[in-house]
Every structure is written in structure tokens, then in C-alpha cells.
Image: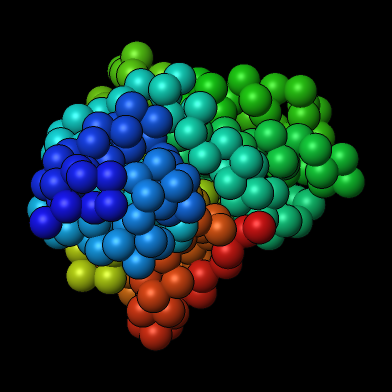
Amino acid sequence: MEDRGGVSTAHRRGQMLALIKQREFVPVTELSERFGISGVTVRNDLDFLSQRGHVHRIRGGAVPRFALGYERPFEETAAQFTEEKLAIGAAAAALIESGETILLDVGTTTVAAAHALVARSELTDVVVFTNGLKTALELESGIPRLTVVVIGGTLRPLQHSLVDPLAAAILDQLAVKTLFLGCNGVDLAGGVTNINLPEAEIKRRMLRIAARRVVLADGSKLGRIELAHLCPIDAIDIVITGASADRDIIASIRERGCEVVVAE
């Protein structure tokens, strides 16, 4: 089969996949114009690529589905979904009250939450524990309104995170009101998952000591399952995601009794 430009369907899909991998995200409208095909045909092509594990479908287009176990550096992921992460961070910070004790995980979206916490100048006497060096540095300008406690451990350069052996020992002595958890996947069947094992164990311990568990995940994470299982959807109180998230997945998560906030 050929499109109106004389390109075979298989070749077009290959070009489409190469473009998505290069750009990280290309909207349906642009793909339609580039290949001279309808939006319906573009969505069919993206569904085809998604079914074969090449891309992850999100609202308005698709993003690459990286090979299992492939972990990208903090600096690389920070450049993607930037505005969406800022909106998610602001929605997360809005949940916090003065006098609260919270736990902030590692990751680019949790750093956005840290930025938003500092911006809330009316907040006082908030104690923030974190195992993320980037997160701690983002919070530094909020001192003394915020007390920032960095959990010790072995440094992982990819995410600038602190993990076992010391991090687990410290976490086991804490109890916090709210956890803002980063992750690589949120799926109805697969639950909340992470791409690397060292951080996964720390995240599980975080989940155990928090009274309120809030997952921060941009739209590309919804419907995705990665290597390490952290917890089922039922164990999460709130998922805060962004405008690119698939509405059907959001609805299915809500049906399981988990609150979903779409930050826009």
C-alpha cells in the first residue's frame, strides 16, 4: 500500500519512527502534513508502532519507547516535557501546608515540585527529606522557611541520587506525611514501576513510611511498565500528571479509586 506521495506504508512508518526517536515527540498534525496523510492514518500508524513496542502513545502523538533497562541521564530527561513538569510540580506543591513533613524523591518532575515549593513564600516550618542532590539544591533557596535534610547513601551519577546502604537505614527511622514519588511507569495492570533496581528499593521504603503517597508522572509515563515493580495502583493516593496523558488511562486509574490530577 502507498500514500499519496508514493511511499509504501512500511517505509512511511519507518520514517515516522526515526523522526519520533530523533525529536522525542512529534504531534499528529505535523506528521499528517509531512507525509500528506490524514490524522486518522497517522493515528493508525502510531497504533501500529505502539503495538510492536516501538513507541508509547500519548495525547496528540507518540514518544519513543526505549528498550527495557535503558536509563537516560537526568540532564537529558530534564529537557523533555519541561512545561508539563512545571505544571505538575506546581500542583504538587499546592498540596502542602505549613508545618508539614514531606519526602521528595529524585527525578526531573520532583525537582519541579521542589522549585514550586520554594516559590510558595507563605509556607513555613516545612521539613523536606530527599535522596536527590538536584532536589536538595533546588530547595536550598527556601531555607530557613524550609528545612532540607539530605538522606545519605551511595551516589548514582545518572540521576544524582543517593541509594543503599545508608539511605535505607535512614528512611527506616522516619515517618512523613506526604511523599512525592518519581517513577518511569504508571499502569493499571503493572502498577507503579521504575527503570533501575537500586533506586527502586529506596522508593519502596519511601512508600512504606508515608501517610499520603503522591506519584508525579508526566503523560509519557502513563500506560508504561518498566523493570522494577514499586506498588500497585491501589497503594497510591494521588497521581499528578500532565496534559499529554492518555484520557482513557486516566479514567481507568480513577475507576480503581485513585485520584488523578491533570495539571494544565
Which quadrant does the C terminus fall into? bottom right
Residue that appears at 51% across and 27% down: 79
Which quarter of the image is occupied by the N terminus? bottom left
Which corner quadrant of the image does residue 97 belong to? bottom right
Q: Nearer the viewer, residue 148 or 264?
A: 264
- Tell me if I can see residue 60 in this picture: yes
**Is the residue 122 above or below the residue 129 in the image?**
below
Residue at x-position 57% and y-position 67%: 261
Where residue 233 sits: x, y (%)?
A: 33, 69
Give coordinates of residue 45: x percent, y percent. Answer: 24, 56
From the top left corner, tell me how far across and down residue 198 is, in percent. Answer: 22, 32
Q: Is residue 177 visible?
A: no
Percent of width and height locating residue 93: 68, 50
The image quarter in which residue 169 lies: top left
Residue furthest to the right in view is: 122
Q: Does residue 262 lie above or below 54 as drawn?
A: below
Q: Residue at x 32, y 33 (%)?
A: 19
Q: Is residue 235 left or right of residue 96?
A: left
Residue 64 vertical position relative to residue 246 in the rendered view, above or below: above
